[in-house]
Image (cartoon, helix red, strand yellow):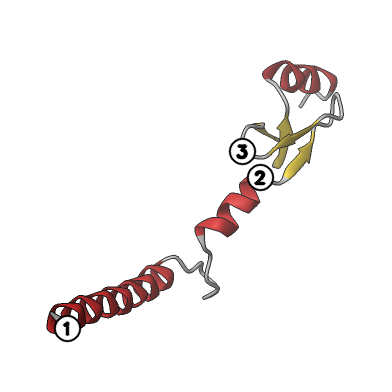
Amino acid sequence: MYRLFLIIFLLIVLYFLLRQMFRGFINSATRDGRGISVSSAERDEDQDQMIEDPVCHTFVPKRIAVIEEMEGRTYCFCSKECAVTFRSQHPA
């Protein structure tokens, strides 16, 4: 009976070792161009960054912002209406 427990314990240890090893491979695959590891949590945190709308000054998460590029600059808006208003106020 103790042999069964020993085998189960060794399989669990092997599972955790393999899982750590594969996490190392995954983390090395998600490095940016500078060699800095970028985890999914960091990417999610970047997408949750609050951006101020230049028209109505409402703060919205970058993830749901309407992103427009005008004259080589990137602007983030809370809605399409604010983007249209901004475009009419700042003609190219």
Q: Earlier in the sequence, mark 2 or mark 1?
A: 1
Which residue is rendered at x = 70% and y = 40% of the image?
A: 74
Mark 2 is on which residue type? Asp
Nearer the observer, disc 3 or disc 1? Answer: 1
Q: Secondary structure at mark 2?
A: loop
Q: Secondary structure at mark 3?
A: loop
Which residue is rendered at x = 76% and y = 27% of the image?
A: 92
Mark 3 is on which residue type? Arg
Picture layout, residue 2 above or below residue 22: below
Picture layout, residue 84 above or below residue 27: above
Determine crowd level at label 1: few under 14, some 14-19, many 20+ residues with C-alpha closer than 10 A: few
Most distant residue in the front direction: 1
Is disc 3 in contact with disc 1, using a CB cutoff of under 8 Å?
no
Residue 53 seen in render = yes
User: Mark 1 sits on what residue?
Assistant: 2
Picture layout, residue 15 above or below residue 63: below
User: Mark 2 sits on what residue?
Assistant: 48
Residue 84 screen position, x and y as percent: 73, 17
Figure label count: 3
Tell me the quarter of the image containing the N terminus. Answer: bottom left
Determine crowd level at label 3: few under 14, some 14-19, many 20+ residues with C-alpha closer than 10 A: some
Which residue is rendered at x = 83% and y = 25% of the image?
A: 90
Mark identifier at residue 63: 3
